[in-house]
């Protein structure tokens, strides 16, 4: 059974710092992995989707990497800003149409 | 495009009452799904559909029914609400890539329905 873990559960950093969020999964046979952002009381906004054949995806200050063999993905945020404060979630698609989510990392960027 | 829409945004029910949470998308997505989000539990898949007339169970299907009569709509029914169903419910949709092609498509989420069962 696929399990997805995100550590740490919460993170506070000063503005301007580069940071890395982690996502681990137990079954390396995945089709894709997606990173989301969730603001308090809101729905999920897709940030990046990495397909199984890809090693990384970039969008602006965000870079997501995927290492299937080690069961890990990282989301790199460059030059963090207070507006980046949110909960970041990763989700894994193992090809069964059943996406498995991690419990998220709650990020606070201090001005 | 409106994307994925959900109604209502908030709902309070009494134990034993029934209701339907509505979800619609205007992106012609084949795949639609329902999740519930509880503190410390993350999002858990309730039911999903890969096309009109085709539905299947997710991780936590008990107490919920779904149907998919059109591509656009995917309602979630609670037949007899219980306090354990107090949660935030999210609907999502995406294009569908057959598993054999080993590719995937981006999921789009609705704004959620916050349900309280007393």
Image (cartoon, coloured by chain):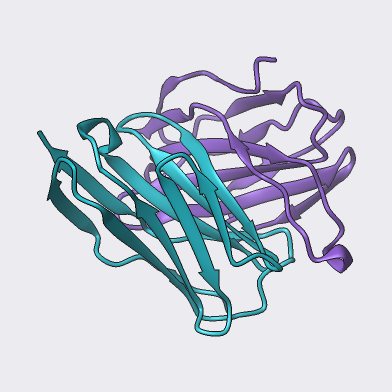
Chain colours: A cyan, B purple
Residue at (39%, 38%) from the top-left corner? A38
Q: Residue at x 49, y 26 (%)?
A: B111
Find residue A56 and report its image quarter: bottom right
* Above-or-below relation of A78 to A84: below
Quarter occupied by the N terminus of chain B:
top right
In the picture shown, does residue B65 fall above or below B57? above
Q: Is residue A72 left or right of residue B76?
A: left
Q: Is residue B85 in view from this perspective?
A: no
For the image, the number of numbered tags is 0
Q: Quadrant of residue A2?
A: bottom right
Dividing the picture into quarters, in which one does residue B59 lie? Answer: bottom right
Q: In this view, does B81 lie to the left or right of A16?
A: right
Vertical arrangement, residue B40 with respect to residue A4, above or below: above
> Where residue A24 sits: x, y (%)?
44, 73
Q: In this view, does B22 lie to the left or right of A83?
A: right
Extreme residue in the top direction: B1
Residue A10 pos. (x, y %): 20, 55
Q: Residue at x 42, y 35 (%)?
A: B15
Q: Where is residue A53 in the image (x, y as percent from the top left)?
A: 71, 68
- Residue A60 appears in view: yes
* Residue A21 vs residue B70, the one in the foreground: A21
Residue A28 locus on image (x, y percent)? 60, 80
Quadrant the C terminus of chain B occupies? top left
């Amino acid at each position: 059974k696929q399990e997805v873990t995100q550590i740490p559960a919460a993170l506070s950093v000063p503005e301007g710092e580069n940071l890395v969020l982690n996502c681990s999964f137990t079954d390396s046979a995945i089709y894709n992995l997606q990173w989301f952002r969730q603001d308090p009381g809101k729905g999920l906004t897709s940030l990046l989707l990495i397909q199984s054949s890809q090693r990384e995806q970039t969008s602006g200050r965000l870079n997501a990497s995927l290492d299937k063999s080690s069961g890990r993905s990282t989301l790199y945020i460059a030059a963090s800003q207070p507006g980046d404060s949110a909960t970041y979630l990763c989700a894994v698609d193992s090809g069964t149409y059943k996406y498995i989510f991690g419990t998220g990392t709650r990020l606070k960027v201090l001005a | 495009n409106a994307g994925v829409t959900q109604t209502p945004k908030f709902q309070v029910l009494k134990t034993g009452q029934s209701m339907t949470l509505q979800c619609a998308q205007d992106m012609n997505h084949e795949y639609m799904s329902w999740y519930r989000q509880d503190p410390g539990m993350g999002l858990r898949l309730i039911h999903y559909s890969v096309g009109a007339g085709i539905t299947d169970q997710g991780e936590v299907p008990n107490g919920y029914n779904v149907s998919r009569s059109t591509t656009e709509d995917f309602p979630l029914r609670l037949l007899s609400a219980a306090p354990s169903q107090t949660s935030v419910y999210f609907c999502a949709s995406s294009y569908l890539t057959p598993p054999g092609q080993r590719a995937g498509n981006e999921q789009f989420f609705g704004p959620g329905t916050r349900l309280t069962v007393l």
